Amino acid sequence: QGQLVESGGGVVQPGRSLRLSCGASGFTFSSYGMHWVRQAPGKGLEWVAVIWYDGKNKYYGDSVRGRFSISRDNPKNTLYLQMSSLRVEDTAVYYCARDGQLGMSGMDVWGQGTTVTVSS
Amino acid sequence: SYELTQPPSVSVSPGQAARITCSGEALPKKYAYWYQQKSGQAPLLVIYEDSKRPSGIPERFSGSSSGTMATLIIRGAQVEDEADYYCYSTDSSGNHGWVFGGGTKLTVL
């Protein structure tokens, strides 16, 4: 079925950068599109970004476009989220999730999330 | 920006049918997906492409879509179905952006 494990979360000051990682196992990582989804404390889910199985196409939510960058290393079975110019409102649990090749089939495997806190 | 609208809460008694709606302008052309999230857990896909059920999801979960509204139906809701439910879809602008609805808290008691 597959497993995803996020890492890299922590406490960071506004304006700084942070990189999240998502390690995949138990499935052929290079065959699947991948998403980042976040959830602020006590709030609903917010879609952040998607990357196609081959890394050739990437799309972002309005609130992170231009500040966040999604990427993947298929030989290393790892997904990344580079977050720059962080804001207090970026504070959330960040989940990675697996989808179909083009990220349009539904997210069927999720990690347990990593917490990012942006605070001075 | 595109929005999906859900009722904040739905309450049913055990054994009753629970219906959770999701309204969005692009739903006549775009699939809806439904995720269940129990407290402290990661989301779980329960319906994809409007009405398909992933393996392992109980048959009491079903979905439908008509016009600008998608609906998640839980027939014979059980106490363990108490959770937040989110619809998910994309708009028709071609920008490949996805959006979640605001979520619906289902109470079964």
Image (cartoon, coloured by chain):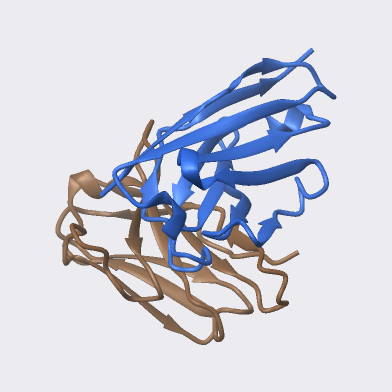
Q: Position of residue B90 (x, y in %)?
A: 60, 69
Outermost residue toward the top?
A: A120
Task: Give the x, y percent position of residue A86.
Answer: 78, 29
Q: Is residue B60 left or right of residue A50?
A: left
Give the residue drawn at x 54%, y 67%: B89
Quick check: B93 above or below A74?
Answer: below
What residue appears at the point 47 percent right and 71 percent down from the top-left corner?
Answer: B32
Colour in which chain A is drawn: blue
Left or right, A57 with reference to B79? right
Quarter of the rendering containing residue A108: bottom left
Residue B1 seen in render: yes
Q: Nearer the viewer, residue B6 or A90?
A: A90
Q: What is the drawing colour of chain B?
A: brown
Residue B105 seen: no
Compared to A63, does B48 lie above or below?
below
Quarter of the image with the C terminus of chain A is top right
Report the residue at 17% width, 60% height from top. Answer: B58
Q: How many marks?
A: 0
Spot occupied by residue A92 in the image (x, y as percentages of width and height): 60, 31
